[in-house]
Amino acid sequence: MSLSFLAPSRTVLLVSDEALFIYSTGAKGVRLVDTVPWSAENFVDNVAQILSKDCGGKPVLVLNDMVEQHYRKERIPKVSVMDKQNVVKRKLMVAFQSYPIRAALPLKEKSKDKKGKKAGSSFIFAAIPATDIFDKIIAATRKSLAPIAGFCLLPIESSDMVQKLSEKLASKGQKKSKWKVFIGLHKGGGLRQVVTCNGDLALTRMTPVTENEEDVSQWASDVYQEFTATMSYLSRFGFNAAEGLDVVFISESAAGEKLGELIETPCNYYSVSSQEAADLLKMPLGYQEDLKYADVLHLAWAGRKNKFILPMKAKVIDKVSQPRQVATLVSFILVLALGYQAYNLMGVFESLSQNWEEIDSTESQKSNLTLQYDKEVKKKQDMGFDIQLIQSSLAIYDDLNNRQIKIDELFKKLSAGLGRDLRIDEIKVKRGGGTVSSFIRGEKPEIPIFILTMQMTFPSSTDVKKGNMEVQKLREKLQTLLNDHTVMITKLLEDYEYSEEIVVETGSAGVKNVKQDYVAEISIEGPRL
Amino acid sequence: MINVIGIRRIFLLGILIVLNASIGALVYLYLVPMQDDTDRSVRRLRSDVRNLKYDIDQIKIEFEQLDEQQNRFDALKETGFFDVQDRSTAKEIFNEIQNQSQVISAVVSVKSGTVEENKEAQKANHKILYSPIEIEIEAFDDSDIYRYIDLAQKNLPGHLSVDYIEISRTRDISPTVLRAIAAGASPVLIKSLIKLSWRTIIPESQVITPESRNR
């Protein structure tokens, strides 16, 4: 149910046995637009004109309130979900073969087998005959070009209203009744009774009752007789007074009171006017001349619904309503798309406008900077010397120096390492992997920049172990002085490790042997000093 | 269908479809490509502005550094870094160095020069001129050799780098050597082989080509 101000604005066609009542419903309430008897000349044209012009072509809800409505309670055996719809459809067709307008409503109650286990679902099958009246309504609606919101049965669409109204009328703490009877007089002269059990429609009756405004007692007595007849039907439906019964009668207070006095069945009896009922249901009814009629209440209730309880299905209705629904949906989608397109267009325009502004400001900034740059370049040229030559030559010179082997510093370090006792007999320094020519090719300096080898000679009388130790000490000292370089002993005075080769001469060969001086060698390599 | 839906609704649907299509075409066929173009233009302009700012900053930095660079450049010019490695000048300089360094003998061999390509030199339309030098020195003391190298680096125009140096003792200090020293002679005790690289920068116009040699 929608909120009052969001209630859909509709044209409701109340189909009674006497005439067609055309109502307009919406946020302001219910308004009777026109009543057209079925026997009226040019019925279709007149109704079509009323629907399109007087009612503004609003969506049409057809609410059937005729006497001839057929209901049957059916049980569907327990079948799979996939098959259930087909089974219901087939059963419905079999039940009402000659009635093309039909529908099935699942009930809340579940049927059980003898053992008390769930045996399937219960449905109310509803149908109405395809009469001349029906054809006229469809033809008029088709001609008016107004969309069809639904084709429903009044008692079914009002069953939830009966439930809610009864709940509202019940005093706090009162036990909820299982059975509810709603009695209301319609403008066409029929008395509509809607009986619900646990919220589901259990029974409905439409009986002609002559309204006697002068004799309220007689009128109440007539209504009471119809109520009694309804109750006798109810007993066949398993009615038990202990389960609770609410009776709601829409009437003027005097008739309501009289009926209340007449009813002997134990029940909660309520008599309210249609306006009071509408207020309880929080829906606007609008101005009504006579508040004893209940049909406006049904119309106001059904007219506000977004989803109907049981929309009736028929090919003729679908032929008219489906293309219109599709057209409405397509229109709606197109309007949404148009909105999106407009939003998108605005976004692109905004982005473009920002870009254009930025282009203008950046171009202006660029031209200013270009002027400044030209000015600086001219200033540079006006200085009269070649800045590029200065910068390039300095870069080349600095790079050459970076790759220079600093002989003087290298030899100073060696001298400090040797001390007073040791002397070098031969020293060789050569470039490592990074040659100066590699710089010419634009390569980065390579390590090592230089490789130095130095040889020291020790007399043949030197103690080899002591000599080796001295060489080791020299290496360590040089390594300390040249900490980021690699200092290695490449040759000791004499080495007895397994990697060395020795020749041992003994006997006469040993006598001939002349002792040679010992030679040690140290190698140093690394980066520029 | 027209009877069911109605001409007005069909007309309305038509208008909505045309409006949607028109706005869609305007946006996706015209405005979006235009937006892409302007986006590219904005990016290009931003990049241009960034580059210009960088260039201007660079020029300003260059101006700030110019004084110092100018002095260094003048000093390099003074040392003959931009000379063409004239062989007669080199000969005179090496003769002078030998006298000053007190080495006993020095055989200097300056090989023919070659032109080397270098990106940095290329920027200033210059080339690097490279001449290998080999020197064989005989000396009484190794310090004379170091002095010789030092003087060569200081006096030869351009840049001189040491590529190879070998120093070896030729004789031990024996009584004979000591007697010669006492008599005022300077016996050769140390021999050295030195390989140097001599580099200067010359304008491209001064590079000797086979054509210019024939002229």
Image (cartoon, coloured by chain):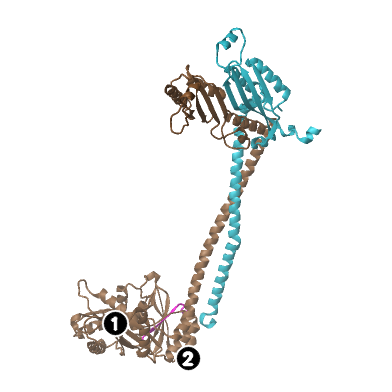
Chain colours: A brown, B cyan
Q: Residue A211, position in %: x, y?
A: 30, 88
The secondary structure type at the circle numbered 2 is loop
- In this rendering, which labeled residue sits more in front, label 1 or label 2? 1
Residues under numbered marks 1 and 2 in contact, where contact means CB atoms less than 8 Å apart: no
Q: Do labels 1 and 2 share a chain?
A: yes
Question: Is B75 on the left or on the right of A246, as rendered?
Answer: right
Taking the view exactly as shown, the residue that stands out farthest to the front is A508
Quarter of the figure with the C terminus of chain B: top right
Q: Residue A186, position in %: x, y?
A: 34, 85
Regarding residue A381, the answer to whether it shows in the image is no
Read off the chain for label 2.
A
List the residue tagged with mark 2.
Answer: A41
Question: Is A60 on the left or on the right of B39, as rendered?
Answer: left
Q: Residue at x 53, y 80 (%)?
A: B6
Mark 2 crowdedness (10 Å alpha carbons): few <14, some 14-19, many ≥20: few
Q: Which residue is drawn at 51% across and 67% down?
A: A337
Q: Which of B166 and A16 is in front in this view?
A: B166
Regarding residue A444, the answer to whether it shows in the image is yes
Numbered circles on residues, count: 2
List the residue tagged with mark 1.
Answer: A120
Magenta residue span = A53-65
Q: Residue A206, position in %: x, y?
A: 32, 88
Judge whether B54 appears above or below A86 on screen: above
Q: Residue A240, position in %: x, y?
A: 19, 84
Q: Which of A49 and A82 is in front in this view?
A: A82
Judge whether B154 appears above or below A486 on screen: above
Mark 1 crowdedness (10 Å alpha carbons): few <14, some 14-19, many ≥20: some
Residue A96 marker: none
